[in-house]
Amino acid sequence: MKVGILQFFGWRDRSIPLNSVYETALERFAIMDQAGYDAVWLAEHHFSSFSVCPSVHMMGTMAAARTRRLRIGTAVSLAPFYNPLRLAEEVALLDVLSGGRVNWGAGRGFERSEFAAFGIAGEESAPRFHETVDIVLKAWTNQRLSYEGRFYQYEDVEVLPKPLQAPHPPVWMAASSVPAIDWAASRGFSILMDPHTSRAELINRRQHYAVKLADAGYSDAGRDIPMARLVAVDETAEKAREVAKRAAGWMTASYVGRSGNVRQEVRNYGGKDPIDYYLDDVMFHGTADSVADQIAAFAGEIGMNYLMAAPLSGRSFRLLTEQVLPRIAG
């Protein structure tokens, strides 16, 4: 199994200088480079202390500068918020500067507040995302680009640089909903699976993706399908559960804005209290041995070949790296 880290940039305590959030992440990248992780996957968010990384491409250059072998993943570039040509340029430049280590993950986003602030109608987010992905891939693989779309039109543009990886970096589409999975499968894209879906639903969606991929004439054989999971590891099960509980409370609170309006698309917690949902159905939490066993059991059940772990504390990252990773990676 390959193991990567989904790196959020949460600023939970505003009495702590913001730059310490970035310094901690940069130190983590260097450790990951030596520890045997496959990739760091950088999460892009806007206008919220839930994760204060508005540019995964800029952060990616810093990750590349601190590492030598670690792949640099975007999880995700929020494609509707970019001019497609600018997005193609930035990711290609990151691929060149990193020596060809980019994993490009793209998504449409789900934050209502982000769509509103960027002036994008919610009903346009999916078609803008699809069109932007199409343009980026054509900009990378065509010497010059002409394009006539619903949102963007270009005539005879040379997009430079081209990515170092040929014909382009490996590509994944974020797919948290059935329509997103169907669209990605119909075009043969590999997918990234999100950290908030229950384990049972993740199994259903992974099976659905395999069926839809086959229906479209593609195979899932040999594909890396990163599955993001929130992970709390501590010296005792009780301490790990408390870390997981605090993180669940922070996340669910972040979905509501100052005015009380829901910032994100409405979520269904399976009829449970949101915190119980995360603790019981979503997260891996416990001692290092227990978490390793939980991951191995789930991998066997779903056929997971790539864990994208999101450690919920500094101790969780350390124990994941020192004790869990050696047992599950291979």
Image: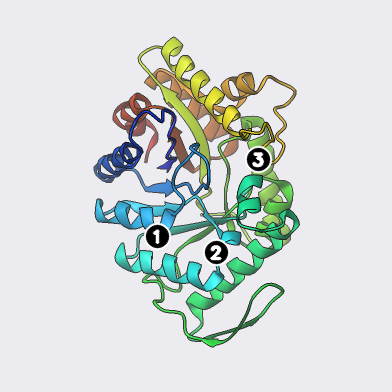
The image shows residue 250 at horizontal and vertical percentages of: 53, 26
Eye-nearest disc, 2 or 1: 2
Chain-order first, disc 1 or disc 3: 1
Report which residue position mark 1 lands on. Answer: 102
Helix or strand or loop: what does disc 3 sit on?
loop
The type of residue carrying mark 2 is Tyr
Instruction: Report the residue that reaches farthest toward the bottom.
Output: 156
Report which residue position mark 3 lands on. Answer: 264
The image shows residue 212 at horizontal and vertical percentages of: 71, 54
Helix or strand or loop: what does disc 2 sit on?
loop
Q: Kindly indicate the quadrant of the structure image that contains residue 2.
A: top left
The type of residue carrying mark 3 is Gln
What residue do we see at 38% from left, 18% from top? Answer: 234
Helix or strand or loop: what does disc 1 sit on?
strand
CA separation in Å, label 2 and label 3: 20 Å
**Given contact means CB atoms under 8 Å apart, are the residues at marks 2 and 3 in contact?**
no
Chain-order first, disc 2 or disc 3: 2
The image shows residue 16 at horizontal and vertical percentages of: 34, 30
Q: How is the image coloured?
A: rainbow
Which of these two is toward me, 279 or 62? 62
Left or right: 330, with 23 as reference point: right
Which of these two is toward me, 27 or 285? 27
What residue do we see at 65% from left, 39% from top? Answer: 263
- Mark drawn on residue 82: 2
Q: Kindly indicate the quadrant of the structure image that contains residue 17.
A: top left
